Image: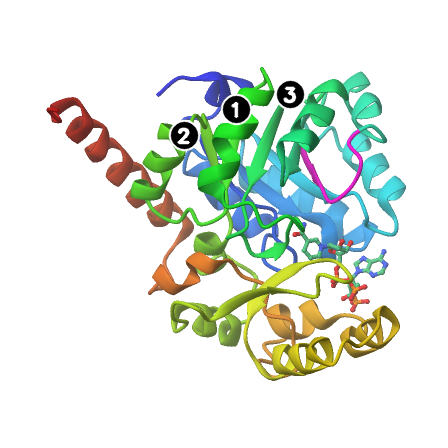
């Protein structure tokens, strides 16, 4: 397939692996890029020297394009941007912040910039800031999420109508079938997180991967909306948050309960009780841990087989 997304990134399949914290290191990103998609290193959980190391290892592991996801609320964001420029990273996906702040500098250095948005008004802002494309990320997505709770099926057509730059869909996509649905809504690519979190190359703890593949419908919730909304698996920590929210605990109390490094504890260290187990709603449909290349191939095969089916449909 050739479309604006494959051309923008110079990739074979319009499938992007999300740059998830504690999960998407150089192993996962290079595996996805080598398989023909676009792999992203998740810089949000990396100290600057760690990010540099992952970029260098990724360059050694693949000669295909790859990128870095940068949450704009990261405390040392200026150091991350400097490293990205110094290491000549060609693609940046930014999220959780104002795209005006860093996009012009990155563009001056020849970087392709994509911003992740939870709503059409943010997509318009990203286009005006000079971004080359946007990811429309719906309510189903894991980790940080928008407050408005707009689902992927409602968000993607609205974003496609609002901007001229290409749109990728994210949130709830883990199969060729869901990818086909996203394309039917107007997306030209998909960004997939949860399915790639449960792969052999993902750096998440095995306890976390097992929790993902054993989860059921209804097991994830969007919570902590008073702070930064985040979708996670229900566990002991989630129950504590829910209890606090039900008695209208203030921001300070919730912040104290959240503490620091909860995502690391859950995703990277595998503490299923105390950790923040960030994952998307689609985890209920993920049943095995496979190599990333196989995940990508299966999604692509299913997508192609459905394309043939659509051609044969009669009304
Ligand atoms: P916390 O404040 O709870 O903890 C910070 C974590 O990030 C620690 O585990 C720490 O590692 C690690 N870290 C890496 N670099 C730094 C740094 N320069 N300063 C401080 N800590 C650093 O944050 P979270 O774990 O919830 O989130 C971490 C980052 O990831 C944030 O920037 C956040 O915005 C982003 N994020 C993005 C998401 C998304 O969906 N895009 C989802 C969740 C988080 P250590 O414990 O080894 O010190």
For the point 65% across and 60% down, the residue is 230
**What kind of element bears circle 3?**
loop
Disc 2 under 8 Å from ligand 1? The reply is no
Compared to residue 227, the image places residue 169 above or below, namely above
Residue linked to disc 1: 160
Quarter of the image with the C terminus in it? top left
Residue 168 appears left or right of 20: left
Q: Earlier in the sequence, mark 2 or mark 3?
A: 3
Query: Can residue 58 be seen?
Result: yes
Q: Where is residue 49 in the image (x, y as percent from the top left)?
A: 81, 51
Disc 2, SS: loop
* In-front residue for pair 82/5: 5
Q: Which residue is identified by label 2? A: 185
Check if mark 1's residue and mark 3's residue have beta carbons within 8 Å: no
| Residue 91 visible in the displayed image | no
On the rendered image, what quadrant is the N terminus found in? top left
94 part of magenta stretch:
yes
Residue under the point 77% across and 74% down: 258
The percent position of residue 161, horizontal first and vertical second, equals 53, 21
First reached walking from the N terminus: tag 1 or tag 3? 3
Tag in front: 1 or 3: 1
Q: Give the range drawn in magenta.
A: 91-99
State the separation of the CA atoms marked 1 and 3.
Answer: 14 Å
The image's mark for residue 132 is 3
Task: Say whether marks 1 and 2 touch (CB < 8 Å).
Answer: yes
**2 is higher (above) or lower (below) than 195:** above
Q: At 74% across and 48% down in the image, what residue appears?
A: 51
């Amino acid at each position: 397939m050739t479309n604006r997304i494959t051309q923008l990134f110079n990739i074979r399949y319009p499938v992007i692996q999300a740059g998830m914290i504690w999960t998407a290191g150089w192993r996962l990103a290079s595996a996805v890029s080598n398989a023909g998609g676009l792999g992203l290193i998740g810089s949000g959980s990396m100290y600057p020297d760690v990010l540099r190391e992952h970029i260098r290892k990724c360059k050694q592991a693949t000669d295909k394009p790859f990128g870095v996801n940068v949450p704009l609320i990261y405390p040392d964001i200026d150091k991350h941007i400097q490293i990205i420029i110094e290491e000549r990273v060609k693609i940046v996906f930014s999220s959780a912040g104002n795209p005006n702040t860093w996009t012009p500098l990155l563009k001056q250095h020849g970087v392709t910039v994509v911003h992740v948005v939870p709503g059409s008004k943010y997509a318009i802002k990203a286009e005006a800031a000079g971004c080359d494309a946007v990811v429309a990320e719906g309510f189903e997505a894991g980790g940080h999420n928008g407050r408005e709770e707009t689902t992927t099926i409602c968000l993607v057509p609205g974003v496609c109508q609002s901007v001229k730059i290409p749109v990728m869909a994210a949130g709830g996509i883990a199969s060729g079938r869901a990818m086909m649905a996203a394309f039917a809504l107007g997306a030209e690519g998909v960004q997939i997180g949860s399915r790639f979190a449960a792969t052999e190359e993902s750096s998440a703890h095995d306890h976390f991967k097992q929790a993902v593949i054993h989860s059921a419908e209804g097991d994830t919730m969007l919570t902590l909306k008073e702070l930064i909304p985040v979708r996670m698996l229900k566990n002991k920590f989630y129950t504590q948050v829910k209890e606090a929210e039900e008695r209208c605990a203030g921001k300070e109390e919730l912040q104290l309960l959240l503490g620091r490094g909860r995502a690391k504890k859950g995703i990277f260290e595998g503490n299923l009780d105390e950790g923040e187990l960030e994952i998307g709603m689609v985890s209920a449909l993920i049943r095995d841990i496979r190599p990333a290349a196989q995940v990508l191939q299966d999604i692509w095969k299913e997508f192609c087989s459905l394309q043939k089916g659509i051609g044969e449909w009669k009304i």
